[in-house]
Image (tube, grey):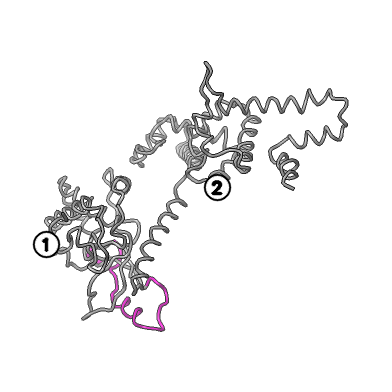
Amino acid sequence: MAPKKASPAAKSAASAVSPKEPDYVNPNVEWHQKVTDAVDTILGQFGMDFVDKQPLTLEEGALVAPMDWQVMHDRLMNPQGSHNEVLCAGGVNVLRCNPLQSMTPSVRINVQKVEAMMMNLWGHGKIVPLLEPVDFVAKQLVNGKMPEFDRISPEEPVQALLVWVARRIRDDADEPELELWRKILLSTQARCVRASSWDERYFWSVNSRRRTADIAKTVTHLASQICQDIWLFKRRKESLLNKTLTNAEVAGLYLQFMPDTETDEEPRSDEGNIQRACQVYERVLSNKVIASVIAWSDTTHGSEGPFNSIGKLVEISAKLKKIPTLEYFFTSMKLALQQDQLEVGELSTKKLRGGGGHGGKIGLLDVVITKKAMRDFLLSRWLDVQNNISPEHKALLKKTFDTAENYEANYIATRRV
């Protein structure tokens, strides 16, 4: 059953459904109950009238200037006015809108991801507002006031904020901290959006999720970028301090200022990962040929790319050792992937290593070492003693097999024709 109504702002999970919408099974009942309980906790701390409080002014310590509702109204009503979808922006009381409201109410919320977001944004004592504005439907004012608030941005950030603030209240956070949370709740960055029809509201909501995903993909560093970042950070700090830093000291700095890195797959707070990242940069990424292949992989395959792992890049570098062999491996793998002769999954760490001795399968790295040795033998000692091959043909063979690019241009391309 849906939870009972608890407060003006925290309606039950079932009430998130419009009467005009079809019946559906609410997959978020338990999470909605947590949000409802969180709102009750917040109202118990700041007063039952907190829902109706106006956003803070700058004089009252607001983080942003409050929303100018008259500007929103004028732009909405003026046919010659703004044609932008976003009419105005400013601070609002985030509780003025039902926190359970959703444009996609039948979609399961990924609670684990929401919890991870809360830890990354507010864990380890951080007190910061939401990173993205909350979007509301712009409406005509009634007696100079907004008649009601309809949120059309994703619900997870607002719900996460409320749940986290409630946890801090229950954990007996001190008064200065609670005052900061109060200011965040009463001056949350928001936008008023021109969206009169249901279609406009729905597509604004789903497009918001897509835009957020695009931003995340853009700013989130992949393994190669993390290696570049760590290496440069270490060198900059050493230059500023005029001394050499150990890997442990660099890891300590990351742990101090990026404590949530401990939950990463390859945390920067681990001195071993600092060492490996610097090793990858110096041995692999500083080589233009190899770096271009990894950049191609990152661009083409993103986080699912075959080289998006610091540990894997270290293992490849350690196994192949010599730069010419490394170049041969990466350029050959790129060509094989481009020609659909190899799938990304076939470059897993397990398949690169192979099964070891005692009849186990030979690993791809050993295959590459053998193939390069055979190629080198073909283009040198074997070809040199073949008197029945003309010098011109020898030169063509050497040119064709010298690099992966030449092989593609002089052999594969001709076969396509």
Residue on which disc 2 sits: 300
**Residue at horizontal 57 percent and vertical 41 percent from the top:** 294
Residue on which disc 1 sits: 48
Residue 67 forms part of the magenta stretch: yes
Nearest the viewer among 70 and 389 is 389
Query: Which comes sooner in the sequence, label 2 or label 1?
Result: 1
| Residue kind at label 1, given as amino acid type | Met
Nearest the viewer among 221 and 338 is 338
| Residue kind at label 2, given as amino acid type | Thr
The nearer-to-camera label among 2 and 1 is 2
Residue 259 versus residue 86 in the image, above or below: above
Secondary structure of residue under mark 1: helix
Residue lying farthest to the top in this orientation: 358
Task: From the viewer's perspective, tell me whether residue 211 is left or right of residue 124.
Answer: right
Q: Quadrant of residue 290?
A: top right
Residue 4 drawn at (x, y percent):
12, 57
> Is residue 87 shown to the viewer in this render?
yes
